[in-house]
Image: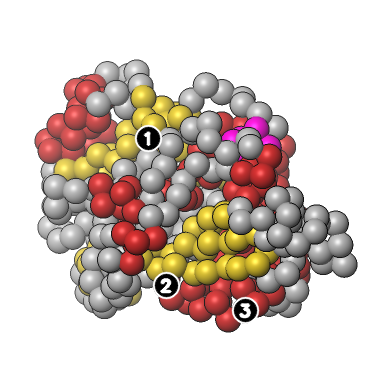
Amino acid sequence: MANSDTAPQGSVRDRRIVAAQVIVTCPGRNFVTLKVETGAGVVGLGDATLNGRELAVAAYLEHHVVPNLIGRDAGRIEDLWQFLYKGAYWRRGPVTMTAIAAVDVALWDILGKMAGLPLYQLLGGRSRDGVLVYGHASGRDIEEASADVGRFISLGYRAVRAQCGVPGLAKPYGVTRQKNAYEPAESELPLETEWSTPPYLDLVPRLFERLRSDHGRQIELLHDAHHRLTPIEAARLARDLEPYRLFWLEDATPAENPEGFELIRRHSVTPLAVGEVFNAIWDCRALLERQLIDYIRTTIVHGGGITHLRRIADLAALHRARTGFHGATDLSPVTMGAALHFDTWVPNFGIQEYMQHSEQTLEVFPHDYVFRDGHLHCGESPGHGVGLDEKLAARFPYSPKQLPVARLTDGTMWDW
Ligand code: CS2
Ligand code: MG
């Protein structure tokens, strides 16, 4: 049954899964990749990286998923998705959904390679010429942040996220401390950072006032509050930012409680983006159906892959919400490749986050997407267009790292 419609074993059309391997590598940061191979020798790759919890997904895949894949038809993408989702009995959750995503993306990659078509073509074809992206600017103070936004504009970006140091707080979220892009997972045990809302609420409107005055009204500006505010604080910030016309305010308050977003909506018309920590359509449902957000951030690697993201994007479209996929550097180039094909096709596309990977990471994951004029362009090679140099990957063994935590200045644990 599971394999009844595939061609004879070993033939060029043999879609049976004959091998699946989990590859963990750390070219500067940890990535988990699933490699699936068919009887015809077609190889597909899926990203399975869950920042700070990488080995949990690797073990889930190795012990509980891979044994179920061998011998099955790689062409039955939908059925395998349902099998892995329903068949586990224990549904959803970031570990499970990241593992399912890795399988799903690897199978779409295989399908593209078998058909000789780029993934966006399998989804229904091109809806746009390129994918609008936003880069990550930051600075220790307003002055530095504005100069960094200027740097992104000079590189051709049309949309920039801006984060800034908060007076009196060490190690603020989103502000780079090296010359490389901001990388939060730096230490084996979580870095303890400090948080205080009043100086932040005072600073952020001044930051955006300055950015509009330095860079004009053409450039799209974004900001990430990273789940730190209570609903009423988030409402105040969203309202105070209105004169500066943000593209979006992200994760204004923790999203477990959709009522919090009703409160923000009551006070402000600043567009809201949520969902990078979601992993299933059920997490997105109330916020979308109640018209409480404008952009859904849930992306392929943590949201069950392309098969599930199509459903989330369709639900968003019913409510005129658009996609704004998470694209931090802890999502591997494999996710970026797959996301760009999805973005190229999806009718209700909004924007794609683009936090550039390091040179070392990009060498380990050869890819065919390119940045031009503020847009990323997926390539035309079959599948998602991202590979893995396994020899090089083997030179960078796993290195344990966790995300930071945040505490209020009196020591109380807070949302990071
Ligand atoms: C962030 C991420 O990119 C974003 O919007 O919120 O940097 C997030 O903190 C990391 O991906 C966590 O692993
Ligand atoms: Mg974010």
Nearer to us of marks 3 and 2 is: 3
Residue 385 vs 22, above or below: the answer is above
Nearer to us of marks 1 and 2 is: 2
Residues in magenta, as a range: 118-123
Q: Amino acid at mark 3?
A: His
Q: Residue at x 61, y 44 (%)?
A: 113
Identify the residue position indicated by label 1 in the image. Answer: 134
Rendered-image quadrant of the N terminus = bottom right
Identify the residue position indicated by label 3 in the image. Answer: 64
Can I make out residue 306 in this image? no
User: Residue 153's x, y, as percent?
Assistant: 25, 25
Identify the residue position indicated by label 2 in the image. Answer: 53
Can I make out residue 25 in this image? yes
Is tag 1's residue or tag 2's residue first in the polypeptide sequence?
Answer: 2
Residue 191's tag is none
Query: Which of the colour schemes (rainbow, by chain, secondary structure, one colour) is used?
Result: secondary structure
Residue 332: which quarter of the image? bottom left
Q: Residue at x 52, y 21 (%)?
A: 129
Helix, strand or loop at label 1? It is strand
**Does the closest atom of ligand 1 sit within 8 Å of the Cβ of label 2?**
no
Q: Amino acid at mark 2?
A: Arg
